[in-house]
Image (spheres, rainbow, N blue to C red):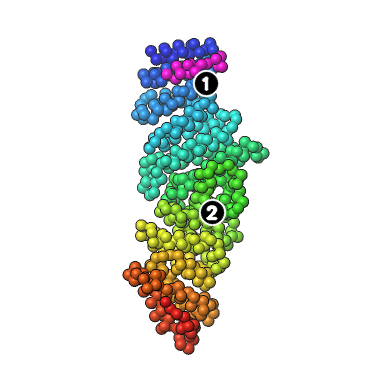
Amino acid sequence: MAVEELQSIIKRCQILEEQDFKEEDFGLFQLAGQRCLDEGHIDQLVEIIQNEKNKVIVKNMGWNLVGPVVRCLLWNDKEDDKRKYYFLMLDVLVKLCNPKELLLGLLELIEEPSGKQISQIILLLLQPLQTVIQKLRKNKAYSVGLALSTLWSQLSLLPVPCSEEQVRADDHGLCRCCKALTEFAQPFVEEVTADKENSMENEKLKDELLKFCFKSLKCPLLTAQFPEPSEEAGNDPLRCFASEIIGFLSAIGYPFPKMIFNHGRKKKTWDYLEFEEEEHKQLSDSLASLAYLVFVQGISIDQLPMVLSPSYLLQFNMGHIQVLLQRTEESVFSKGLDLLENGLLRLEDNSLLHQYLEIKSFLTVPQGLVKIMTLCPTETLRKKGLAVLQLYINKLESQGKYTLFRCLLNTSNHSGVEAFIIQNIKNQIDVSLKRTHDNKWFTGPQLISLLDLVLLLPEGAETDLLQNSDRIMASLNLLRYLVIKDNENDNQVSENFEKQTIV
């Protein structure tokens, strides 16, 4: 009955011109086609659609059947013998239907599902979507941008696996989707690189691909956990996705050194792009993610100019580190710790000039480490924060250490952290007293000024001794050390110290 009804509708439309098709005809065609699917007449429906006489009708009306066919593929058992007919019908519709209408229909289908069905429908429709876009003659860049934005929006709803076991299981299909998404974007990247004339449409396409790369760097790559860099790590699907995204950036004219080293400057290379407000907010996260992938994971690091000094690299990464440490997700701020540690390990001890502390991030980053040390619920990350802060202190020259100690004593508001700083002050005094030079900042008047902070009770006489016990004990320990260690003959500390009033 349904087949006869569909044939009747087609027979009536065959005598009409395209422009004479009515809205009623579209509705009847879709309803009859849906009934054919429901009643199991898929092979006959395929035969009708493939009939050359029905080519014009299918071109204009067939896109209405894509949704029902896709739902049959999603809902029917994978062992169903009819699946090959569903795939055949989908392939025929993609080839014959109006690409503009088909594009909108496919994107609507991608937006519909939730949960695990998100990955299922993305994996099913990426190839048809790519084919449809490549058939478009006008506004291809807009269509690519619309498709990538829709795909990314759905992909961002999937949970990011946070362990190797979850990556292998890939229960929600995120890893498979990432791989498929790079295959989807590849021909459009190649199209950009092949156009040597840089036409206006090509520039628009480049912009859309750049936006997609930025979005991907933030989600899922910002929160994704990666294995330690090794030969086996190269097979990690999310790391492979990251490598592909960085490769896309280089291919469309934005190699990572150009991207990272423009962070924080007033004039950026992407200023001309028309980003939405939310897209502007994610730029810093995306670039910080890129910095982590390059410097910690080592992806495409061979593109980095070898002439750059370690202190120069640290200076430009400090802004990215600050962005990562300000996030609340452990998977993100742990990357900030790794990126900072990576940069510091390139430096020699006592080599980081105090002038760097005039750059705001060089003081806000250690304050961010203090927050991790005191507020993070995970012990391993608290210890990592402490170790990285100590490494940071070790790399600073004497005046830099002095400046940092003063800053943290004034801002940390945590007895344990203050005790840690005071212990470091004691160590620096000890080093200075043993040297014949470079003792200006931890002996004499400069030290007295610092001791005023160390030996000051936070709330004066009202100070809670129990709550501040760590700081108080560290201060008394430092005072005892000074009394014993400062040789009366040298009198480098006590001569000035006796003149001060200790509160």
Callout count: 2
Q: Is residue 121 above or below residue 7?
A: below
Q: Residue tagged by mark 1?
A: 59
Q: Position of residue 475 (x, y in %)?
A: 40, 75
Residue 146 in the image: above or below residue 415: above
Closer mark to the observer between disc 1 and disc 2:
1
Instruction: Please check the rendered image and state whether residue 27 is part of the magenta-colored stretch, yes or no.
Output: yes
Badge 2 element: helix
Depicted 214 relative to depicted 18: above or below: below
Residue 235 shows in the view: no
Position of the N terminus by quadrant: top left
Is-magenta flag for residue 52? no
- Furthest toward the right, the residue is 197
Q: Residue at x 41, y 45 (%)?
A: 160
Please, what secondary structure does the residue beneath circle 1 have? helix
Residue at position x 44%, y 14% from top? Answer: 6
User: Could you tell me the amino acid type at mark 1?
Assistant: Lys
Please state the extent of the stretch shown in magenta in the rendering. Answer: 17-31
Residue 301's disc is: 2
| Relative image position of residue 278 (x, y in whole percent) | 51, 44
Q: Earlier in the sequence, mark 1 or mark 2?
A: 1
- Can see residue 363? yes
Rendered residue at 32%/70% (across/down): 466
Disc number placed over residue 495 in the picture, else none: none
Looking at the image, the residue that sits furthest to the front is 462
Predominant secondary structure, magenta span? helix
- Residue at 41%, 20% (x, y): give it: 34
The answer for how far apart the CA atoms under marks 1 and 2 are is 49 Å
| Residue nearest the observer in this picture, 231 or 334 | 334
Which residue is farthest left? 466
